[in-house]
Amino acid sequence: MENKNQNEDPKEEKVSIASEPIKAEAKPKIAIVALTSCEGCQFALLDLGEKFLELVEKVEMIDWGMIEDEEDPGVDLDIAIVEGTPITEENVETLKKLRKRSKLLVVLGNCAAMGGIPEIKNYHEGKNTIKHVYRYIQGIENTEIKEVDNFVKVDFVFPGCPITAEEFLKYFPDLLEGRIPDRTDQPVCVECKAKGNRCLLLDNKPCFGPMIQGGCDAVCPTSKMMCQGCRGLRPKGNVKAMRATLKKMMTDEEFENVTEIFGLRDDISERESKM
Ligand code: SF4
Ligand code: SF4
Ligand code: SF4
């Protein structure tokens, strides 16, 4: 899924009002729910330590399977936070029920937003990848991987694999007030240059930074690794120009292979089909 909630004007960071404001007098009711995932995005929240505890003070945590065993009471929610890919029938049912009882539904991370690493299977099922995972495949569900917004409306995306926890702190207060933040359309390159990094492209090393949504502090190029696009395409990312530039540095097959890692390949195809 391409990030759809990003501001067209890079100079401004505005907020728009969600259709039903959350009542100010009560603490907002929140649930954090994992579908099929590695739970790394939830751990990114826990890694915030005291900052996260301060945030939790401001909400009524209705359900969070990672930290408590109690059954979800099923009450209405102000915000449902969903991590992971809806792969099983149970995942899809959980997701649809959450949407019905939540004013806002936001997704955490690349798996939920873009299909993530599980989506690699979509591109290789012709090679029957399931046989490499299970010895006996009878009775094993082997559905196509689809990101969350194929099943329910998504109000906001925290992108990345894992999410950038500081970005969660930046935007979550708006969501608590019932407002949907707009994200500035800014490539990874901006933060990369701010770090004083030498651009990998100058040394004929591939990097997707120019077409990918920033906000991760350019962690990969800062470690001399190419940006592989875990945060998704920028609304104005120029895929055609990126392909042309990278032709000197990687084959078409290598390009496709890298775009499969974080579920970027289908988004690129969709963007190119509209050109
Ligand atoms: S986006 Fe990455 S860290 Fe988050 S659940 Fe998926 S695989 Fe794990
Ligand atoms: S290394 Fe990558 S992210 Fe950094 S400036 Fe170059 S293209 Fe952009
Ligand atoms: S540099 Fe690219 S791949 Fe690395 S975290 Fe940022 S968006 Fe993801």
Image (cartoon, rainbow, N blue to C red):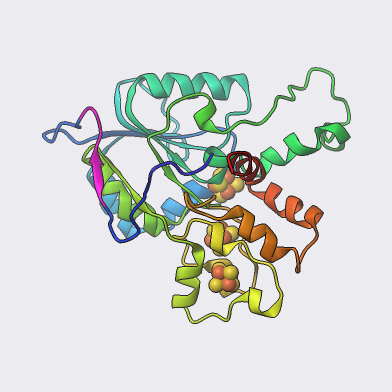
18 in magenta: yes
Q: Magenta part of the protein: which range?
A: 14-20
Ligand 3 is located in which of the four quadrants? bottom right
Q: Residue at x 49, y 82 (%)?
A: 196
Percent position (x, y) of residue 261? Answer: 68, 50
Residue 122 sits in which quadrant? top right
Residue 57 visible from this viewpoint: yes
Please tell me which residue lies in front, 206 or 180.
206
**Place of residue 131 in the rendered image (x, y in percent of width and height, measured from the top left):** 87, 32
The x, y position of residue 140, in whole percent, is 77, 22
Nearer to us in this view, 220 or 204:
204
Q: Residue at x 70, y 64 (%)?
A: 246
Q: Quadrant of residue 24?
A: top left
Who is closer to the viewer here, 263 or 56? 263
Q: Nearer the viewer, residue 131 or 270?
A: 270
Whether residue 39 is visible: no
Left or right of residue 65: residue 20: left
| Screen quadrant of the C terminus | top right
**Image: 148 above or below 92:** below
Say which residue appears at 74% left-offset and 25% top-offset: 142
The image shows residue 162, relative to residue 60, as above or below, that is below
Which residue is the extreme one toward the front? 275
Q: Where 250 falls versus 25 (above or below)?
A: below
- In the depicted structure, whether residue 255 falls above or below residue 193: above
Q: Is residue 55 left or right of residue 189?
A: left
Q: As drawn, is 34 to the left or to the right of 223?
A: left
